[in-house]
Amino acid sequence: MKKIKVGIIGMGYIGESHIEAVRRIGCCELYAIADTNFELAKKKAEYYGIVKCYSSVEALVNDPEIDAVHNCTPNFLHLEINKQIIKAGKHLFSEKPLCMNYAQAEELVELKKKHPEKVAAVNFNYRLNPMVQEMKGRIADGKIGDVRIITGSYQQDWLLYDTDYSWRLEPDMAGNSCAIADIGSHWMDAVQHVTGHRITEVMADLKTVIPVRKKPKQQVETFSDNAPAEYEEVAVQNEEYGAVMFHTDKGATGVYHVSELAAGHGCYFNFEINGSTASLRWNQEENDRLWMGLRSGDNRLIIRDPNAMSGDARKYTALAMGHPEGWNDAFKGNIYAFYDYIEKGMCGDPVFSTLEQAAYIVKLTEKVVESSKTRKWIKID
């Protein structure tokens, strides 16, 4: 069997997670990487035994041996690099968000229509935690009745101090949102995916809690805990906290909040779906289990067990019950779903996020920001 040759652009924190995931997928060969910091790219290529190493996007994208390209660059580069990948006739796997704004997202969706023979996806990886897939299946099978209320949060603490800094705080690099675009996007994608509902109206309150931060004069890695020795004080425009109320197209209502200032939380991502007969809740920090709530009967924990899971969920779990699977396994599961879809001839509905679905998340993010500014409910057209 000919393996799909993969190239990865961007060797930061998330790029290395892509390297690790691709290397675990049997139908793939991690063939090339690229970064404008060529010394960093060479170091990664030598460490992982990767065949080719490039210093430019163009060189990697135009390599005729490469079948698929992962875009792991910052947000402001997504539009142009994703366009290059699509125009070159490669399969595209982009980090989220798809791009900086909805106008750019529409441009990419229209461009992709000219290349229907190729697959394009955006990395909303929490979808492919097997217990999230199990939740999706149980809701679709009517195990909780009609979905009525959707609640939850996503909390981290990597921007807790004024010495913490990220390009995600800068509109020129990240777009007009930090917390909502970065982690709120995951929350909105996941709950729409598991419920089959679409968020159609929002009312938001966003907050820049630390208005002035100490920006390092030298680059530091995301999630680093080291205070910069040399810095400049800069005014912060994007938010680190947000709360959003919403309605869906099928009559449900809900609320969620996101924070990157919640001490003690590394990845506290959770959502609860209240139905007309039962509830289901999933928490990424205990991601091997679902909580099920009942009014008539005992509440229960549903532990990840491949022998007891639905067929659709079982495809994305690898370890026996009691052997915990984690964030990196769900990350790999999402990328596996992408390559499995390609290998099987693009049949059926993909389980990963398509460009169209990711574009809608970009639109939702814009409307959340607009709602916070105008202090009004905003309908999503």
Image (cartoon, helix red, strand yellow):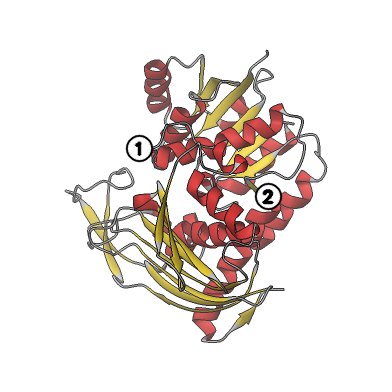
- Above or below for 343 versus 279: above
Q: Amino acid at mark 1?
A: Gly
Task: Quickly name the residue at label 2.
Answer: 355
Q: Secondary structure at mark 1?
A: loop
Task: Quickly name the residue at label 1.
Answer: 322
Q: Residue at x 33, y 46 (%)?
A: 222
Q: Residue at x 55, y 48 (%)?
A: 133
Q: Position of residue 37 (x, y in %)?
A: 42, 31
Mark 1 and mark 2 in contact (Cβ < 8 Å)?
no
Q: Amino acid at mark 2?
A: Leu
Quick one: quadrant of the C terminus? bottom right
Please state which of the two labelled residues, at mark 2 or mark 1, is closer to the viewer: 1
Q: Number of marks in the image? A: 2
**Comes first in the chain, label 2 or label 1:** 1
Q: Return the residue nearer the eye: 217 or 272.
A: 272
Neighbours of disc 2 within 10 Å: few (<14), some (14-19), many (20+): many
